[in-house]
Image: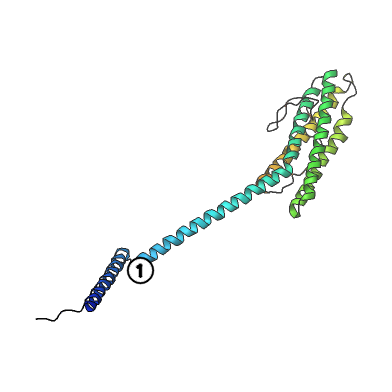
């Protein structure tokens, strides 16, 4: 009759069998995972390349976003500097156009309103010059040089209106040389409007792309002509004589 197995030995054997089965299960799971996820060297290289490409795209997108934000901030900053000055220049053009129209009618009312519009031109040019000068004080380097030159250009237009237009305004609508005076005034005002338009264009370029091109201002009256509509491309809104 076979000898019985010791309970201690039986328990030890059973524990060993349990551990062995657990280890075999872990190995089976590991090799099954490796079988499922196995890839060749070419596949791993392609996967790494795709990951690097995605990382590059994300980096480029972030860099592009930062550059756009920086550009937008620059536009806002430059507009904050010169947008008020551009508004004054636009009103100077509008008032100049209205003055020429009023001087086109030889009457006491036309003379009074035309004179008021010319005074508004002077005030608006003066205000534009003040804004640009203030901006130049806060600017640095090439930007300061551009703004300083731009302020000098606006000042030259302001001085020209006071020197060449204001003294030519008749004291009375019954003067004998009314037509000659009006023709001279209108020619100068047309030239002022054209040059204000060039300054406005320069400001637009500065605001949008930080371009710094100061328009040349040539002294001398523009073409002679009677009071009439303004040339193309200029603001047409008609302000009241009492509004600068």
- 111 relative to 206 in the view: left or right: right
Q: Is residue 40 above or below residue 167?
A: below
- Numbered disc total: 1
Q: Which residue is disc 1 drawn over?
A: 41
Q: Is residue 103 left or right of residue 35?
A: right
Where is residue 160 shown, x and y percent of the image?
84, 37
- Give the quarter of the figure containing the N terminus: bottom left
Q: Along the line of sight, which residue is nearer the eye, 129 or 118?
A: 129
Looking at the image, residue 189 lies above or below residue 154: above
- The correct choice, above or below, for 162 with respect to 46 in the image is above
Residue at x-position 82% and y-position 25%: 114
Where's residue 180, x and y in %?
85, 26
Asked if one can make out residue 56 in the rendered structure from this viewpoint, the answer is yes
Q: Nearer the viewer, residue 35 or 171?
A: 35
Pick the quarter of the image with the C terminus: top right
- Name the spot of residue 21 as percent of width and height, x first: 25, 70
């Amino acid at each position: 009759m076979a000898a019985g197995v010791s309970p201690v030995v039986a328990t030890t054997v059973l524990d060993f069998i349990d551990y062995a089965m657990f280890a075999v299960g872990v190995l089976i799971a590991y090799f099954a995972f490796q079988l499922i996820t196995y890839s060749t060297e070419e596949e791993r290289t392609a996967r790494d390349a795709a990951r690097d490409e995605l990382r590059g795209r994300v980096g480029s997108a972030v860099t592009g976003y930062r550059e756009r934000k920086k550009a937008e901030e620059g536009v806002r900053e430059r507009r904050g500097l010169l947008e008020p000055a551009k508004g004054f220049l636009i009103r100077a053009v509008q008032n100049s156009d209205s003055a020429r129209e009023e001087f086109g009618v030889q009457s006491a009312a036309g003379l009074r309103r035309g004179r008021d519009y010319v005074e508004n031109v002077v005030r608006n040019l003066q205000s534009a010059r003040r804004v640009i000068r203030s901006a130049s004080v806060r600017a640095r380097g090439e930007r300061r040089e551009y703004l300083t030159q731009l302020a000098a250009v606006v000042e030259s237009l302001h001085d020209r209106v006071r020197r060449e237009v204001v003294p030519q305004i008749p004291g009375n609508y019954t003067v004998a040389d009314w037509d000659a005076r009006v023709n001279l005034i209108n020619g100068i005002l047309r030239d002022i409007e054209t040059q204000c338009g060039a300054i406005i264009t320069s400001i637009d370029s500065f605001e949008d792309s930080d371009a710094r091109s100061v328009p040349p201002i040539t002294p001398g009256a523009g073409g002679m002509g009677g009071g009439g509509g303004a040339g193309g491309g200029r603001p047409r809104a008609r302000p009241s004589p009492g509004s600068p």
